[in-house]
Image: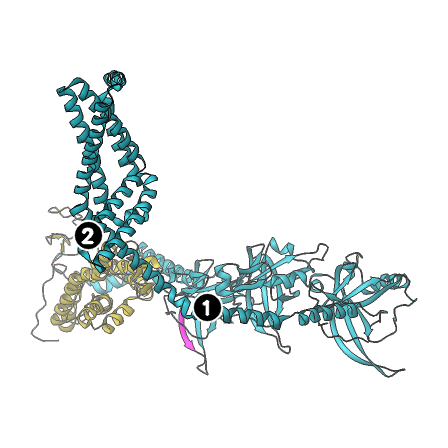
Chain colours: A yellow, B cyan
Amino acid sequence: MTPDSAPILTAHRAGLLGCRSCGRVWPEGQETCDRCGADLVPPDRRGLQKVWAWWAAGLIMYVPANLFPMMRTQTFAGLQGSSEATILEGVVELMHYGNYDIAIIVFVASVIVPMAKFLAIAWLARVAGRPATVEQAHTRLKIYEVVEFIGRWSMIDVFVVAILSALVQLGFVASIHPGPAAVSFALSVAFTMLSAQSFDPRLIWRGLPLRSRTGTEGQD
Amino acid sequence: MTDTPPPVRPASPVRKTAARAAQAGINVIWLVPIVALIVTLGIAWNAYSTRGAVIEVEFADATGVTPGETALRFREITVGQVESVSFTPDLARVVVKIRVDKDVAPFIDSEASFWIVRPQVTAQGVTRLDTVLTGAFIEGYWDANVSGEQTRFTGQDRAPLIREDTPGTMVTLAMENADGISEGAPVLYRGVQVGRMENIRLAGTEDQVIADAFIEAPHDKRLTTSTVFWDTSGFSLSLGASGVSFNVNSLSSVLQGGVAFDTLISGGRPVEAGHVYALQPDEDTARNDILASDSGEPLRLAMLIDDSLQGLAKGADVQFQGLRVGQVTDLAVTQDEPRGEIRQVVTMAISPARLGLPQDATPENALAFLEQAVSQGLRARVASAGFLGTSLMVELVEIPGAEPASINTDAQPNPIIPSVPGDLDDFSANAQSFLSRIGNLPLEDVLRSATDMMNSITAIASSEDTRAIPESLRETLDQTRSAATDIGGMARDLRDSGTAENIARLVDEAAAAAEAVKLAAADVPDMVDQIDAAATAVEEFEFAEISAQAEGILADLRAMLGSEDAEQLPRNLSNTLEAASGLLNDLRDGDAAGSLNNALDSASTAADEIATSVQRLPQLIQRLEATAARADSVLASYGERSAFNTEAVNMLRELRRATEAFGSLARLIERNPRAFILGR
């Protein structure tokens, strides 16, 4: 892309293998990291299968998480009726009651972030190892880091339900129970986190030098 | 992997990796999403399959029904939930969509009924108070038979009073009007509630009200075709020969009415649901209405009468051998064709069972029975009923030697039973004579006498003399009072002048008596022996006893003042005082100075009279005189015996005391003259 971009020396190109656990590089062929004892796995697009598998599982679980009620509120032991609300219904209800800020938080944490994660991971897994410019590679890395960081925060909805279920157990008067969506949502978040973790960020850099090389040296 | 890749030499990883990826098999990790998919689909399918059916129920309104909250309950267990509430196209009613649990959905068929349960306050109490807290819910009822699937229902406006599954029998009651009876009113059997009234409504074409009465099992076995129902609503107040009777069945029946039933005659057939009974207005009517209580068709007979039928009314008894066997059902006038006479037709209904025939006897049996009886002389006649005979009844009596007759069974519309003239004439005659006797009573004379008597009484009461009576009384009292005053004044006079002098005179007289005694003693020396004897007697005489006697006399006197004798004393005193009064008047009127001596004499006389009036006083004086004589003789005999002198002085002192006592009597009279006049 840029003519001045010199081929960047990556560990792979240098015949080294980075430890995913502690980051130390070892010569290729080394089986385990002598420093931390982790297995040294060369970056491989086959590892993306894991990413895709977890991603798919997370996406599957995300469907019932949105269709089933997140939590069930019982008043007067269910005599006066119990209200169930899915995530989106809860958001709508919050907006209906005028709690726009909370509605936005819930919406962002429970809808936008997971969706963005799915998209981001899918995109990363799709483009990983593909030729890219340095800037593109950096963008991908940043996205990966954001996904990694933000993944755990998607659990906020689950936490809310868990805490409310634990706190609001007023017996006859009112009680809150987690709905089936809470489990689904938690699983979905967990699966996406595993998916993000399964992604090998080293694959981002695998495409770089090749692109440079192919651009400068042409095919072998 | 390549065999010897130099470390710094770049390989061709893309291609290599892509190739490897293509060659690589399916990773085990793919099981995770597969399992997730299976689980999710399983959950989804499960949720869908247990979703249950949606039914729609129409209600007049949806009070308390909240979509998503209001539950559908069957035997108090939630079996569904309201999903949405909407209107019918004409906006007249609301449609409640209910998601019913799958396991009960098949049973909700065409026989299901729905109603909204709300708190209710009725005369029977407050029900379903729990729904105040929990909110209304829809209750449904359906049986276990699956018949005819249906998804659209019309809800009932309120909970049915009787559940359809309650065992029992529903009968229909027909009544004139439903006064006092409300739905849910109890049906009582001997005071025990065994059912309820419901569905009170106007009969379509007749002028009647009909209601359903549900009798719970096992009490419905008591219902037979000869059962009678009567109204127990409110209270009854009746005035009869035995007094006023006031009957209240129960507070509940006062508030919401009620009916009771009883089976008076055994042998009725069991009833089926929907049997129609006539509701009698009260228990007496029900118990007496034999036609209502008897099973079977009554025999209708007619009789022709020439007499006046005044007093014979519909419902009058038909008696046979003194027992009620039926009642008059109709009165009419007919023209006897051959003769052109106007005759009265009395139609009566006779219960075959009451004639002694079996329970299942038909009118034909009864007719046959009566035909036979008529051939033996049975006739119908009108008789008076009751004591005063103001009402009439029909009697079936055997007339010995009656002309042969038979029941005209061909007559239309009813067979005609031969009749004889009733004893109405006797009755009429009796009544007439009775009334004429009443008419002949000399009421006017009595009244006149009474009026005269009253007038006399009035005249007496209003006469001057009668009116003067109180005045005379008052005058009498005044006179009495003035007499008392006079007595008082006289007594005062007595005290002021007379008494002391009298006493002095009395003493003087006593002294004179003593002197006389002394003289006598002196003049009669031969009496010395007597005196000696007297002295001896005196010696023997207990002077203490004398004084004791004197004291006893005084005590007697005092006692006398309070005794019955005192009654006489005041009377004497009164006379005396009257005399004194007259004297005083004379004194006042006449020459005071001239009359003074007379007055004093009179006073003296009065004092004497007073003295004599005291019965014992003269005796006392006599005794005293005797004693004084003896004392004097003793004195004379024994000279200046100081002791005797002392005793004599004591004696005199006692005398004075007696006088003083008398004076106190006089003072008492003065103080309280009425006591003497009135005797107390």
Residue B615 appears at what percent x and percent y? 32, 37
Which mark is on residue B596? 2
Q: CA distance from mark 2 to mark 1?
A: 51 Å
Observer-nearest residue: B172 or B57?
B172
Circle 1 crowding by C-alpha within 10 Å: few under 14, some 14–19, many from 20: few
Q: Is residue B417 magenta?
A: no
Q: Position of residue B367 (x, y in %)?
A: 84, 65
Mark 2 crowd level (few <14, some 14–19, many ≥20, 10 Å Cα):
some
Residue at the disc numbered 1: B460
- Main secondary structure along the magenta-highlighted residues: strand
Q: Secondary structure at mark 2?
A: helix
Inspect the magenta stretch and tell me whether residue B86 lies in it: yes
Does A157 sit above or below residue B496? below
Q: Amino acid at mark 1?
A: Ile
Residue B161 placement, left or right of A168? right
In this view, the residue in front, B248 or B269, is B248
Chain to which the residue tagged by mark 2 belongs = B
On residue B434, the disc is: none
Span of residues in magenta: B83-87
The quarter of the displayed image where residue B304 is located: bottom right
In front: B342, or A197?
B342
Q: Position of residue A104 (x, y in %)?
A: 19, 71
A127 or B507: nearer the viewer: B507
Percent position of residue B441, x then y: 66, 69
Does the rendering let one see residue B107? yes
The kind of residue on which mark 2 rests is: Leu
